[in-house]
Amino acid sequence: MSGKKLLNTVERCVDENLEGLVTINPGLRLIKDTRVVVRADIESVKKAGKVTLLCGGGSGHEPAHAGYVGSGMLSCAVAGSVFTSPPPQDILTGLRMITKDNPGGCFVMVPNYTGDRLNYGIGMERGKHEGLKISAVTVGEDCATSSKDKSAGRRGLCGMFLLIKIAGALAEEGRSLDEVTKLSQLAVDNMGTIGLALGACSTPGSNGPLFTVQPDEMELGLGLHGEAGVKRIKLLTAKETVKVMIDHMTNPENSTHLPVKKGDRVACMINNLGGMSVLEMNVIAKETIQYLEGNLGLKVDRAYCGAYVTSLEMAGISISLLHLNDTFTRCLDAPTSAPAWLVPLLGPGQTDRQTPAPMMPIGGPSSEVQEAQGLSISKAEGDRIYDIIEKVCDSLQSVKEMLDGLDSESGDGDCGSTMARGAQCIKEKLGKKETPGLPVTNPSQLSLELASIVESVMGGSSGGIYSLFFTAASSQLQKEVTSQTWLQAMAAGIAAIQRYGGAEPGDRTMLDALWAAKETFEKKLADSSPVEAFREAVKAGESAAESTKDMKARAGRASYVSADLLTKADPGAMAVAVWLKAILELLV
């Protein structure tokens, strides 16, 4: 990452972050001249004598920690500078705000980092000296370290937020400070987390990333601030990556492992460290749950996926597991108003996550459907259609680079690749001429088959447009197949493209070539042979395709591009000209 960020100043970015948070969340308040966020209704909580909760850490981990302030979770969150522990004075301010005159006392969760332990210790000791009732648990559930040597201990990672949810629910139930503390410690003792990064983050004001991960590598077991992990490994697939992470987390030879056995009930939190796409996270979530259930035999009763605690824009993930009992499960399901808490993706008994597609009635299609499937033509006519399809596919594949080059001017440079991909699939499904795989003797059904192929294989707007064309055309070929019905099929396909795509002739799209060919074919068919009429139609289509280079784009992706940059013919129109010419060559 380059370090580029959309901020006002580096100096005030943490403060403005908190000011923005409370601006859009009316249930939160920011204590003036501090970096301490509290519940807006904190006085009523204290008056009820319920245990209050405090936690915090360095900024740059948003939505942590202030995003978890709300009923059923934190009463107060204290923020430090970016990747820096909160100062003791702000911790003490938070403790005073939520603990003074509160008989229930305050439960504090301390992330297991040296700076946090020291600063929280100072703040809590001062608070206790003032008579505040405080109890604390240090949270460290990192499973990365394999050494048995004395160290600072397991780091506090994403498991912290499962704990905040459990402790918050217990406090909301009216449990005593002692009960909240003991059950929270039990949760910490029964959870584990492992992290992994594909790339580093950059802090505000820096000139580059905090560390470097090579393009073909990943780092296993790193900390939230980019602290080195246990090892670098080669880039793997999502499935392989999940296996490596969970195997390390649960490996009995690892001194910080989380013990698991078949049949254990667990909650799983799959956390985005900031730079992963939703697409990647969903794939990782699928692989994680499948591995836990299918390979390890665990029962994943609750699963969460999203950005719970980040490291700015670090491209990476963490996976946390918590052994469940009935109390923890109830607490995880309890309501909360904290803005950052995301509901679980999975509940108990939801093991079947797919539903079958609608099936055709037993006995096949009805007589009405069978009648509508279209007229059959002779074997000889079917052979000619076979040859035409094969010729069209070969022609489109031969111009792949040319069309991609044209598309690079106004799109993403893949028009030729898309057309070639569709052509390749059609050709594969076409099979051998003696036993064709497509219904070449039934033009209506053939048109529907082609529609299905292009929409699933080509995708995008090109696949959609051609699918519309073929689907609409098929209805005109059900009862007879003549030159006139081929013209009607072409007209119906064009009308569908216009109706749903929004383009008109002259808008610099594939429609320009199609429209010109159809209009000429219709005009010439009245006084010429079908082949001669189609020859003139092909010429008109080619001329219209070439003329698109002088048109202003008013539809499609090219309409978003400056007219000064559009100097070549539209690739979609040129593709139409190519397949029209290929058809003609097989007709003469």
Image (cartoon, grey):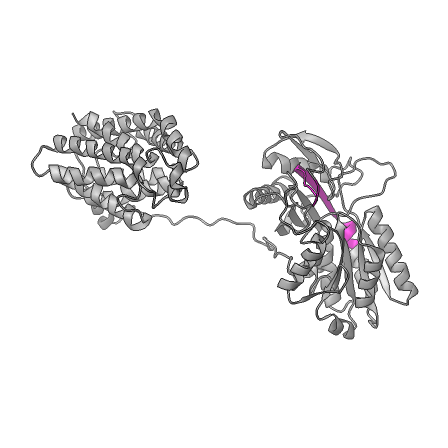
Which residue is pictured at 25% across the width and 37% down the height? 513
Residue 332 at x, y percent in the picture = 67, 58
Do we see residue 324 in this rendering?
no
Residue 259 at x, y percent in the picture = 75, 43
Q: Is residue 150 left or right of residue 25?
A: right
**Quadrant (top left/top right/bottom left/bottom right) for the N terminus:** top right
User: In this orientation, which residue lies closer to the viewer: 36 or 267?
Assistant: 36
The answer to which image quadrant residue 336 occupies is bottom right
Which residue is pictured at 31% across the width and 33% down the height? 575
Residue 498 lies in the magenta-colored region: no
User: In this orientation, which residue lies closer to the viewer: 295 or 388?
Assistant: 388
Q: Is residue 543 left or right of residue 174?
A: left
Q: Is residue 415 left or right of residue 250?
A: left
Query: For the view shown, which residue lies furthest in the front direction?
Result: 564
User: In this orientation, which residue lies closer to the viewer: 4 or 157?
Assistant: 4
Query: For the view shown, which residue lies furthest in the right direction?
Result: 129
Which residue is pictured at 82% across the width and 52% down the height? 138
Residue 587 at x, y percent in the picture = 17, 27
Range of residues picked out in magenta: 186-206
**Quadrant (top left/top right/bottom left/bottom right) for the C terminus:** top left
| Number of numbered discs overlaid on the protein picture | 0
Residue 198 lies in the magenta-colored region: yes
Residue 488 at x, y percent in the picture = 18, 43
Query: For the view shown, which residue lies furthest in the left direction?
Result: 527
Do we see residue 233 in this rendering?
yes
The answer to which image quadrant residue 275 occupies is top right
Q: In this view, does 120 lie to the left or right of 411?
A: right
- Say if 485 sits above or below 188 in the image: above
- Say if 243 sits above or below 278 in the image: above
